[in-house]
Amino acid sequence: MQDVEVETEGWIGRTRAPQTTASAARDEAFPVCRLERLMGRPASTWTVDDLVALVRERGIRCVNLMHVGGDGWLKTLDFAPQSPGHLRDILEGGERADGSSLFPGLGIDASASDVVLRPRTSSAFLDPFSPVPAIGVMCGHAGRDGQPLPQSPDTLVRRAYERLVRETGVALHALGEVEFFLGRRSAEEDMYGAHDRGYHATSPFVFGEGLRRRALVRLAEIGVPVKYAHAEVGYIEPAEADGLIWEQHEIELGLAPLPEAADAVALTRWVLGNLARADGLRCSFDPILRAGHAGTGLHFHFSPVLGGIHGATRAPDGRLADPARWLIAGLVQHGGALMAFGNRAEGSFVRLGQAKEAPDAVKWGECDRSALVRLPVVAAAGEGRVVTPPTVEFRLPDGSAHPHLLLAGVAQSMARARATPDLDALLRATAATAAGEPAGKAASLPRSFSEVGEALAQHRAVLEAGGVFPPVLIDAQIGRLRR
């Protein structure tokens, strides 16, 4: 293929000429991450030199430092590098920002709020939405002392993950089921379904199928692990007030270590929002769009990894494996406190109160979708080969969740549960029977922000253990919830 010389304001590099249809068809489809295909090796091996060379060779004009704020949404700081040296400074040193504006309510004093964005080279991706050629690079946050910022959601999930590995030997992986609603004005030619009857619907009975499939591919190309996507049960016929028809979809991501799993949720929301805006659609992650209809969950599946191998949730004799026992016990004991990070909107309590595809009590079970925690069926090939790792599903969080803070809390809960006295008795008491009821009297979930605040105050020591959650952050969250 012929190289074409391009000049971009003093930078001279080489880029590829457009491919013919025949040559494009011959391109390798894997790896699915576009930048890995261009680099020719895995992201974990990329260096600053590699990114500098990429920018020069591909005529890239912008480098965007991207990171997750206190609200759980993706943020960006954009640069137009003036020289290779300038680009190297950006990628090696990062840049300063105002932490009190990025992390309001997480305990950062506005009088000492300088933070530094720290790029992670292996997270770079070609920005599919930029109007000019650009790469995005995910970042962590450092304080004035150069150390990871304690209140940073990125720092928190990494510290919790590392502590869990260090103390238990378990590298906990997770995936999020990102549910979302797409809305548009109804038209005479619409031929869609009925209320809450959209599960696995296909075109022409859903209008969002094309967007959902583009999102799935875009995510894979920027390096986000994905599993599958489908239309979800929620379908809301247009109301006279707004004339909008809403349908629900889901993208289930792929298993990844907790820090990467949290980033994957933030990037998925970003991709969906951009695609919806381009298509003139509304995209909502609200826990409840309209009372009486299915809400928007953000279920997380967890897979304990030991020695690089995804472990089974049950031993051959049927008993729960230890990592699964610790995880389930941690979630049923501390799930109410984790709502501070996983259920952050007024609609969260409407969703739980309806108990439609949402937990109704503190219990766990094999297949009970009204349980807080369940063990889903495991897919296997004809000869019994397991094709997807067994997981433990946490069904409490919803679309308002902050993925980084929530997953940090899950890791802390699992680490504490390992030392729970009479752990087996706790699991027996909270296990759902065949009829779906727990063996003992089921505890209720918090039904208001004030109740969540009380649960957080009661269980704060679990989150603060090992120096993971700073006390000032927990104080700020309790104050917010009790108002």
Image (spheres, rainbow, N blue to C red):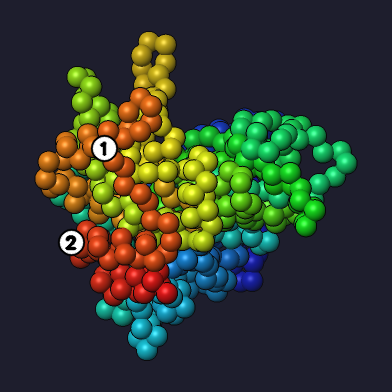
Q: Nearer the viewer, residue 331 or 241?
A: 241
Q: Amino acid at mark 1?
A: Gly
Identity of the residue furthest to the top in this view: 383
- At a point 52% along the width and 71% down the height, the residue shown is 77
Marking on residue 391? none
The residues bearing labels 2 and 1 have C-alpha atoms spaced at a distance of 32 Å
The answer to whether residue 399 shows anywhere in this view is no
Q: Is 479 on the left or on the right of 319, as rendered? A: right
Q: Quadrant of the N terminus?
A: top right
- At a point 58% along the width and 43% down the height, the residue shown is 294
Upstream in sequence: badge 2 or badge 1: 1
Identity of the residue furthest to the front in this view: 441
Mark 2 lies on a secondary structure that is: helix
Q: Amino acid at mark 2?
A: Gly
Mark 1 lies on a secondary structure that is: loop
Q: Nearer the viewer, residue 85 or 384?
A: 384
Q: Nearer the viewer, residue 83 or 288?
A: 288
Q: Which residue is mark 2?
A: 466
The answer to whether residue 426 shows anywhere in this view is yes
Q: Is residue 152 above or below residue 135?
A: below
Q: Is residue 261 above or below residue 378?
A: below
| Residue 92, image x, y percentages | 38, 68
| Residue 401, image x, y percentages | 45, 56
Instruction: Say few, some or many: other residues with alpha carbon within 10 Å of mark 1 (under 14 / 14 to 19 / 20 or more).
Output: some
Q: Is residue 201 above or below residue 39?
A: above
Q: Mark 2, mark 1: which one is toward the viewer?
A: 1
Q: Is 139 on the left or on the right of 328, as rendered? A: right
Q: Which residue is mark 1?
A: 440
Q: Quadrant of the C terminus?
A: bottom left
Q: Nearer the viewer, residue 56 or 422?
A: 422
Instruction: Say few, some or many: other residues with alpha carbon within 10 Å of mark 2 (under 14 / 14 to 19 / 20 or more).
Output: some
